[in-house]
Amino acid sequence: MPQYQDQLNQIIQIPDKPQRIVSLVPSQTELLHYLGLDTEVVGITKFCVHPEEWFRSKVRIGGTKNPRIEKILELKPDLIIGNKEENRKEDIDVLSKECPVWMSNILTLEDALEMIEQVGAITQKHSAAQSLSQQLKGDFAAYTDTLGQTTMKRAAYFIWQKPYMVAGKDTFINELLKHAGFDNIFGSIPRYPEISLEDLAANQPEVILLSSEPFPFQEKHFAPFQEACPNAKINIVDGEMFSWYGSRLLHSIEYFKALRTQIW
């Protein structure tokens, strides 16, 4: 049986061509669909909303943080695909004793491209995965070139309310904020720190980005931010465009361009 190294540097034995795949991560589920693995994917999470036809037809095995272990094992997967941030170690440890589990760990665009290529190799969709990776690499490089010497906007990216939490250092969101032309004012604080509105005001953001996920921010949530930072521009942003690291990245650049026209 072929051996593969995942992004946690674990060596995994995986069948030559997996026939029963369970995905524990929405963005990676969408990637599997992009690669044409319709019959091979047998289980997805309740948050795997793309593509819609899979969300309606595939077996749902619970959430990313609370998967139904028994349901997964009933599907007899020969490959489970997870992610260090999205999934809990204790669940992965249990599943790993029964099935091959390949884990991603995505902090940078390069990590995302590597994941795409490795998933393509594991599922024998290498050509399609390689083409996708090269296209994304070129698209992001070209957009970075167009930004040139454009001044980056000082921004805060909120992912949660009560308590307020932002995307910080060592997150894929922080990486994409840079590619989109934003200077993350909390980019020196690890991961997803809790902050107060006083902390926000003290850092004087020019832009406050309120994500549509995991907390579904809406315009009704603007008032406290407006009071704390009356001169900042506040925008609801599509969280998928900043945090999904599979084929959804094909849409991120156009989204960033549209967002810049609203803010700059």
Image: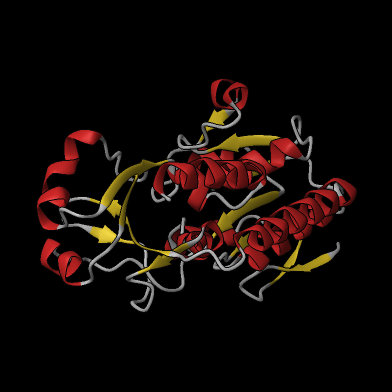
Image-based side of 127 in relation to 119, left or right: right
Give the quadrant of the N terminus: bottom right
Q: Residue furthest bottom?
A: 188
For residue 14, say whether it is visible. Answer: no
In the rendered image, which quarter is residue 195 located in? bottom left
Q: Residue furthest right?
A: 127
For residue 151, say whether it is visible. Answer: yes
The residue that appears at 61% across and 26% down in the rendered structure is 54
Q: Nearer the viewer, residue 243 or 74?
A: 243
Image-based side of 262 in relation to 9, left or right: left
The residue that appears at 53% across and 64% down in the rendered structure is 150
Return the x and y of residue 80 as percentages of the image width and height. Answer: 64, 51
Image-based side of 168 in relation to 251, left or right: left
Q: Is residue 49 above or below residue 181?
A: above
Q: Is residue 139 above or below residue 49?
A: below
Q: Nearer the viewer, residue 198 or 75?
A: 198
Return the x and y of residue 135 as percentages of the image width and height. Answer: 79, 51
Return the x and y of residue 208 as percentages of the image width and height. Answer: 29, 53
Return the x and y of residue 81 as percentages of the image width and height. Answer: 63, 52
